[in-house]
Amino acid sequence: MAEPHFREIEHTADLGIEVEADSAADLFSCAGLALFSLMVRPEGVKAREIREETVSAEGWEALLHEWLSRLLHRFLQDGFIAATITVLEIDEAHIHARLTGEKLDYERHDFETEIKAVTYHKLLVRNENGRWTAQVIFDV
Amino acid sequence: MKIQQIADYVWEIPKHGNMRVPGRVYASREMMSDLQKDASLEQVANVAHLPGIVGYSLAMPDIHWGYGFPIGGVAAVDADEGAISPGGVGYDINCGVRLVATRLVEGDIQKRLPALADSLFASIPCGVGAEGAIPKLSKAEEKKLASEGVRWAIAQGYGRAEDIEYIEENGCLAGADPETLTDDALSRGLTQVGTLGSGNHFLEVDRIEEIYDETVAAALGLTVGQIAIIIHSGSRGLGHQTCEDALKVMGKAMEKYRITVPDRQLACAPVSSPEGQRYLAAMACAANYAWVNRQVMMSLAEDAFLKALQISPRELGMRLIYDVCHNIAKPETHELEGRRQKVWVHRKGATRAFGPGHPAIPPLLRPLGQPVLIPGDMGRYSFLLVGTDKAMRETFGSTCHGAGRMMSRAQAKKAARGRDLDDELGKVGVIARYRGKGTFAEEMPYAYKDVADVVDVVDCAGISKKVAKLKPLAVIKG
């Protein structure tokens, strides 16, 4: 088993991620944390509150889009940053997860980049022999 | 991809595959060779697949790789037969720029510049989650704002009635129906009116440094040394949500209307379809929200100036020169092959640049052409231009919108390590106030291309004309 991990896609005008994991649950959890880490440096983000999120969509790609959009809303609306994401249930149509984290505090956190939206551009989710990969481009 | 040079600064991508029209790119030879390194030109070709597209799929010299549409893209579609694409407008609906003149000269503010920067930074909420510039709206009031645009802001005491004339569409895009906004979009908009946001958005105090066209500058009441303000921002969360909501609907509508496009982010629906009409009504609301946002920020900036400099509104003499959008779709009439045709013009990272005499330009400025504002990076300069007849003939009255990035955000941050960015800006005479260090590093001048190169191309190609150059003195950012 390899640890789930992500890589930032470098491009002059855009920001994106490639994620790899051994399960859909790990893929979605890792993609969520990657999104937060592009916006705020993960060091120093504390588990001060617990939230649960449920998202539905048709198909893995749409689900990943909806999932990341939901997390982005939580950040843009309430300033919420996740420290951990535990996926409780997941299938091709829905995800239910528990998040711990806290609100953005400009004094304590290093704010990096404001992401405006999760795009459909080159959006990919693949499962090849149990190896899950995803690619997402963000609007910044 | 095959590319042919058509004129000194114009390149054509001939029709191939399922392209409905050829592509045309305004760029210098150097820019063209850079562009061939990424997928920007492919995106110009992709846009040419939109149903009902007329003329050319156009790209301005600040074109860069986007998602679906390239940034710097212009596409006009037939108003009856064409398809409207939310991706051709972008997430930040009516992101735009306004230029405000004052009666002050540099000497009037030089000593108090740090205090002025502090005062502006304290008055205008910046950064992620910025809110509370004005009291929280009720949903009913927000809907009124979305229908009325800048008229709403003026009635609330933000700015002056005469400002309206100097805003594209008089600060209210027709057809806005707030009932088409989702609850999510409305909720995101409740507390963000009058907030700058983050990323490349800014509010700047500038000095007019150089004038290229004395006649136009004099008619606009601008002289060298004068202090001006530039505000660059958009429709905040309400606009982003509106784009997102529409992309979902359009994605499904494409099957229904049997439309195929090469990239899902180009999702579109016929202008005349319920989905198309609904998007246009919601987009107009978001556009109106953005104009109100810039109007309120201008008013907050006026208060900040008065407080910091202890002068009267008369001494300050704030006057809106013009407000342009650079992420929008507009219903316009253009001449195509000798025939007047109603079209919807998508401008994504492109600015309207109507030529002299156009009825959309306020009467006093009409003989000059429409003012166009092209912001550069925060260390160098921004430009004021006017639209031309040639833009009307060649680019549906459109021109560029900015500098474009040279470094990725990660590269810019890497380059910032171990450097004192405030000090570097200080050395070029700019005071900065900002919320996020990371964002600030991403926005450093070295991360951007030189906007002068972009402006020179549109000037030489004749699709707009340089009027003045502005040099930043103080900048506030998210």
Image (cartoon, rainbow, N blue to C red):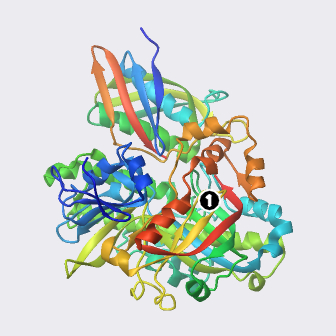
Q: Is residue B102 above or below residue A108?
A: below
Q: In this view, does B39 lie above or below A24?
A: below
Task: Give residue A9's position: percent from left, percent from top.
Answer: 45, 33
Seen as rendered, the residue at the extreme right is: B111
Badge 1: few (under 14), some or many (20 or more) residues near its Cα, within 10 Å? many
Task: Give residue B25's position: percent from left, percent from top.
Answer: 34, 59
Residue drawn at x 47%, y 27% is: A7
Where residue B397 sits, quadrant-wise, is: bottom left
Number of numbered discs on residues: 1
Identify the residue under disc 1: B202
Residue drawn at x 52%, y 28% is: A99
Residue drawn at x 18%, y 54% is: B19
Nearer-the-camera pick, B469 or A94:
B469
Nearer-the-camera pick, B380 or B328:
B380
Q: Is residue B142 visible?
A: no
Q: Can residue B5 be seen in this view?
A: yes
- Amino acid of disc 1: Phe
Task: Give residue B315's position: percent from left, percent from top.
Answer: 78, 84
Where residue B120 sits, quadrant-wise, is: bottom right
Chain containing mark 1: B
In terms of secondary structure, where does tag 1 sit?
A: strand
Q: Is residue A50 left or right of residue B246?
A: right
Q: In this view, does B428 lie above or below A114?
A: below
Q: Is residue B468 above or below residue B282?
A: below
Task: Give residue B312's position: percent from left, percent from top.
Answer: 79, 82
Q: In this view, does B63 lie to the left or right of B51?
A: right
Nearer-the-camera pick, B395 or A136:
B395
